[in-house]
Structure formats: structure tokens, C-alpha cells
Image: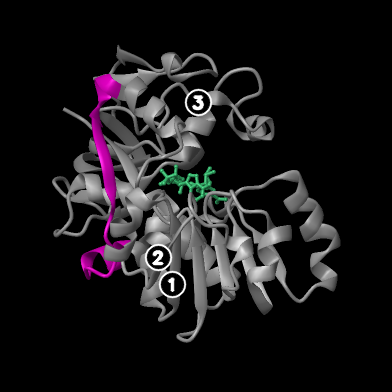
Amino acid sequence: MKSIIVNAYGGPEVLEVKNIEKPTPKSNEVLIKIEASAVTRASTMMRTGTPYFGRLFTGISKPKVKTPGTDLAGIIEAIGSDVTQFQVGEKVIAATDLKCGAYAEYICMAESEMIVHQPENVSPEEATGIVDGGSTAIAFLTEQVTINPVDKVLINGASGSIGTAAIQLAKEFGAEVTAVCSGKNASLVKELGADRVFDYTKNDLEKSSLQFDVIFDTVGKLSFRKAKRNLNDKGVFLTPVMEFPTLMHMLFVNPFSKKKLKFAATGLRKQDQRMRDLIKITDMLADNKLKTVIDKVYSLDQIQDAHKYVDAGHKAGNVIVKMA
Ligand SMILES: NC(=O)c1ccc[n+]([C@@H]2O[C@H](COP(=O)([O-])OP(=O)(O)OC[C@H]3O[C@@H](n4cnc5c(N)ncnc54)[C@H](OP(=O)(O)O)[C@@H]3O)[C@@H](O)[C@H]2O)c1
């Protein structure tokens, strides 16, 4: 089978297309024929091995796993003798986490891992595309804050993977949503439900008098020090990007401040919490309450181009790799 193989950390050129042996499922495993995978920011960070503390999980001098890719949608092609929850021919969505392996035509996973049934009404591209941004956004907006129907929520990086999911979720929870993006993505974020659009290339948030209960900086581009002026008295600033000032603030300022700065590494939570979120977003896809935004679709042979595109930091929604 065709698979991407990496032997070193580095630029997109470390991603090589190889032919390797198709795996055979063990008694507790399913064999999934992968239809689509996603190029997430996590997969580009795992490729470069940065930030360096991430190497504690992915390998110090070179990647521990040879085949990258953490999210997939596919069809069960075979099952082990002890498998009870899945049958041959069923469509599934899966997250492989640090085990990776989703940039390939086939993968074996234990049925106890992060696998859910794929809703009938979505394509494999839509199914795999929602896993990263959707799971991250729902974790932040349900575990780190409670969104009440009257709340005013600002989503920065609203056109990204987390941002496009966060707009829809905040609207679903009843909030009034202000989406921050560049002008070229204004119509996209409005279609997703944003009540107001703020063009970050033309306006400065800190200079505005807008006030929010929650500011979700999905791309880690705002400074909490400055943005806290735009937070209500008990407002919360959420970020999925850990930087030194964030850590210092959480340790030494948060305990004495009404306005809180919160970070979470949602992918490192326990499997039952992550599974609960994956089921929630899958159900929302099935009920048409959540839509996957797809920017570009590449083939497995074009994986280097897909990574270059994501590295540039301006994708709108999600970038997909479609298997042949
Ligand atoms: N902590 C966690 O659990 C966790 C989980 C998943 C991801 N993450 C991290 O979260 C971050 C975001 O991930 P993502 O996949 O959502 O990102 P993404 O999709 O790559 O974000 C791209 C979007 O960001 C927008 N953008 C770029 N610069 C901006 C700025 N200065 N202000 C506002 N928007 C800007 C771009 O719009 P324009 O083209 O208009 O500039 C583009 O649409 C990454 O750093 C990722 O590693 C953390």
C-alpha cells in the first residue's frame, strides 16, 4: 500500500511517498481503508519537531512514528475475531493521536481507540476535516467556559480550522459572535453565523470599545495584556497556543485577577473526554448543526504541497488529503 514515510524532522520535503506492506488486523483490531485524512497544524508541528518540548512525545532526535497524520475517515475492510462494535463495510471517523499513521491507504486500530461511525450525510473529506478544529473548539467552549445565550463572544482567527468550528458552536450555544478575520474571509464567517465581522488587517481590536464575555484567540495572535481591555469584568481569554508569557500569566496573575487567561492542550486529555467530544461533533454534523469548511483537497502524492500550504498559516478551514 501507499504510505507517507518520514525519517527526520524538517520541512515538507521529509514527507516521502513509499510502498509498504498492508497491515493485518490483530484479534482486537479493525483494518480501515482510509478515504481521507487532514493536514492539521498539529501534523505540521510534528513534522518540524517544534516547539521542542513536543519532542518529549514525538521523539527527541527524530520522529518515533514513521507515518504521520492523526485524523481520518474510511471504511472498515476487515475485523479481528474479538471485534464487536464494528462490521466490515461500515464508514468510520477516527483520531489516531500520537500513534499517527493516517497518511496511508490503510491502518489497523484497536476497536477501543478513538473510532466513531461516520454520519451518512457527510463526505469522507467533511468527516475527517472536522475532527481537529471541531474537537478543539468544543473542548474550549464547554470545558473552559460556559457560554450563556446572552454572552458576547469574540473569535480571533475565525477563518481557521478551530475558528470556523468555534463560530458555529458559539452560535449554537446562543452567543452573539464577533468574528475576526481578514476581508477575504468575511463572507465565509458570515455564512457560518457570525453576527459581526472585524477585519484585523484594517482595524485594531485594542483601539475599539467592543466588550466581550469570552475572547477565543484560536490562532494565538492576540496579546492578553492588550486584549483584556476588551473583556468584561469577569471575562475569559482562551488560547490553544502556549507561549512563555501565557504560562507566567496563568501561574502568577490569574489567581489575583477577575479576568482569566486559559490554555488547554485538548489533545492530551483522557480518551473518554476526547471521545465524548468526537461523538458530540459527529452528532452535530449528522444533524446539520455543524459544517466542515474545506479549503483545498490534495492527493497523497501531493502531500508536500499540502504541508507547504498549511505552513503558510492562511488556510480557510481545513486542508484534506484524499486517497486514490
Ligand atoms: N491547544 C490545543 O489543544 C490545540 C489543538 C489544535 C490546534 N492548536 C493550535 O491552534 C492554532 C490554530 O490552529 P488552526 O488549525 O485553527 O489554525 P489555521 O487553520 O492554520 O489558521 C489559519 C487562519 O488563521 C488566520 N489568521 C492568520 N493570522 C491571523 C491574525 N493575525 N489574526 C487573525 N487571524 C489570523 C488566517 O486568516 P487570513 O488568511 O485571513 O490571515 C487563516 O484563516 C495552531 O497554532 C495549532 O497548533 C492547539
Within 10 Å of disc 1 (Cα), the crowding (few <14, some 14-19, many 20+) is: many
Marks 2 and 3 close (CB-CB < 8 Å): no
Measured as percent of width and height from the top left, residue 160 is found at 41, 49
* Residue 122 occupies quadrant: bottom left
Mark 2 highlights which residue?
167
Say which residue appears at 28% left-offset and 54% top-offset.
292
- Between disc 2 and disc 3, whose residue precedes? 3
Label 2 and label 3: CA atoms lie apart by: 29 Å
State how far apart marks 3 and 1 are (Cα).
34 Å
Q: Position of residue 149 (x, y in %)?
A: 45, 85
**Residue occupied by mark 1:** 177
Q: Earlier in the sequence, mark 2 or mark 1?
A: 2
Residue depth check, mark 2 versus mark 3: number of the one nearer the observer? 2
| Location of mark 3 (residue) | 47
Q: Is residue 135 above or below residue 142?
A: above
Q: In the rendered structure, which amino acid carries the disc numbered 3?
A: Arg
Q: Are marks 2 and 1 in contact (CB under 8 Å)?
A: yes
- Asked if residue 114 can be seen in this view, the reply is no
Name the side, left or right, on which 184 lies relative to 61. Answer: left
Q: Which segment did they paint magenta?
A: 282-302
Residue 230 in the image: above or below residue 41 = below
Q: Is residue 92 above or below residue 288?
A: above
Q: Is 301 a magenta residue? A: yes
